[in-house]
Image (cartoon, grey):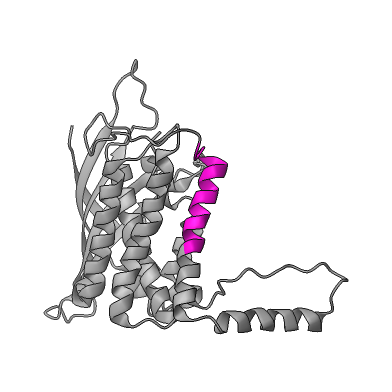
């Protein structure tokens, strides 16, 4: 399976980015664990305060470099350990786009787009917390997302299993571009979300949920709360969806029946993010779609 692996090692980091206030408080330095009995509790506290002081003494530029190099270094290290990076000379691979006979029917391309988009917003929030202005953050956030996803594609070029995909890289660029646009024009950010939905079968869980396209959907949500002409509080909780997903690609065999299907759907549902914000200040549900909270009408492209 050709996988959307750009956020496999960074999946936890991405989720933390979406909760930007929590992520921005996390130190970028690595604390050294202590062995019980070797240091007193007071010494542990002193060491922690010292590490925080070192972080506080860093300039915003140094923090930004630490953030970006740390993220890209994680990608490279994970690729060497798990994706046979640097096992051959660099090469490219043509994966095509959304055709019926592509490895994932194009769902993996939307996975790249969504990940780059979501990371651009996460990086932007962190930039603001470490001292960059709003205008600087809305530019540097998407650029950092593009750098992280780009280093993945460069690493793929040295992998015998994958190879550099121009289609994947184009999807990364589009995702970062959408991320920049919605940061630059916040009124549109209030109206539009790009989301990933995951509804697994718990008796048949995948090891890597980020590449489980058999149970994933990618969608654009148009939120009523972003339009001034809709003032009714109940109507403001509604939204419209336009999405895409594929089914039957995981089990496809060339010698068997072709049950691969690509679907486009329209839906109407509840804006879970708006409801959750009444009790928990989070932007997580601007990026994650909760399953079974909408009704859909779909059509097959076959």
From this viewpoint, which residue is outermost toward the right?
37
- Indicate left or right for 84 with 1 as reference: right
Residue 237 in sight: no
Above or below: residue 120 compared with residue 243 = below
Residue 262 in sight: yes
Residue 272 placed where, x, y %?
A: 34, 68
Residue pictured at 32% horizontal, 36% vertical: 104
Above or below: residue 114 compared with residue 238 = above
Residue pictured at 31% horizontal, 81% vertical: 134
Residue 232 placed where, x, y %?
A: 18, 80
Residue pictured at 87% horizontal, 71% vertical: 38
Locate the C terminus and report the quarter of the image it occupies.
top left
From this viewpoint, which residue is outermost toward the front?
89
Residue 97 placed where, x, y %?
A: 23, 39
Total residue callouts? 0
Determine which quarter of the picture holds residue 285: bottom left
The residue closer to the viewer here, 240 or 138, is 138
Residue pictured at 26% horizontal, 72% vertical: 183
- Indicate left or right for 156 with 143 as reference: right
From this viewpoint, which residue is outermost toward the left?
229
Determine which quarter of the picture holds residue 133: bottom left
- Indicate left or right for 82 with 259 as reference: right
Locate the N terminus and report the quarter of the image it occupies.
top left
Tell me the magenta residue range: 69-86
The residue closer to the viewer here, 293 or 181, is 181
Helix, strand or loop for the magenta stretch, by majority: helix
The residue closer to the viewer here, 151 or 291, is 151
Q: Is residue 83 magenta?
A: yes
Q: Is residue 85 magenta?
A: yes
Residue 75 placed where, x, y %?
A: 49, 52
């Amino acid at each position: 399976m050709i996988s959307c692996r750009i956020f496999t090692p960074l999946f936890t980091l991405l989720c933390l980015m979406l909760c930007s206030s929590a992520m921005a408080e996390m130190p970028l330095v690595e604390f050294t664990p202590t062995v019980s009995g070797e240091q007193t509790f007071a010494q542990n506290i002193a060491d922690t305060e010292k590490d925080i002081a070192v972080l506080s003494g860093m300039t915003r530029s140094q923090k930004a470099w630490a953030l970006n190099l740390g993220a890209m270094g994680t990608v490279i290290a994970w690729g060497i350990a798990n994706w046979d990076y640097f096992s051959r000379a660099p090469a490219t691979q043509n994966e095509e786009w959304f055709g019926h006979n592509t490895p994932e029917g194009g769902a993996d391309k939307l996975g790249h787009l969504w990940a780059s988009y979501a990371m651009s917003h996460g990086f932007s929030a962190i930039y603001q917390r470490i001292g960059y202005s709003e205008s600087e953050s809305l530019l540097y956030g998407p650029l950092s997302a593009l750098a992280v996803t780009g280093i993945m594609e460069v690493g793929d070029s040295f992998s015998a299993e994958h190879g550099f995909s121009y289609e994947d890289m184009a999807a990364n660029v589009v995702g970062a571009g959408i991320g920049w646009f919605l940061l630059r024009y916040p009124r549109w950010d209030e109206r539009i979300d790009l989301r990933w939905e995951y509804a697994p079968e718990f008796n048949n869980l995948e090891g890597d949920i980020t590449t489980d396209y058999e149970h994933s959907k990618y969608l654009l949500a148009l939120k009523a709360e972003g339009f001034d002409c809709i003032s009714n509080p109940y109507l403001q909780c509604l939204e419209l969806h336009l999405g895409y997903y594929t089914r039957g690609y995981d089990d496809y065999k060339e010698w068997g029946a072709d049950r691969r299907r690509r679907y486009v759907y329209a839906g109407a549902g509840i804006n879970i993010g708006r409801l959750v914000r009444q009790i928990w200040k989070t932007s997580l549900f601007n990026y994650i779609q909760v399953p079974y909270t909408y009704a859909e009408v779909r059509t097959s492209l076959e």
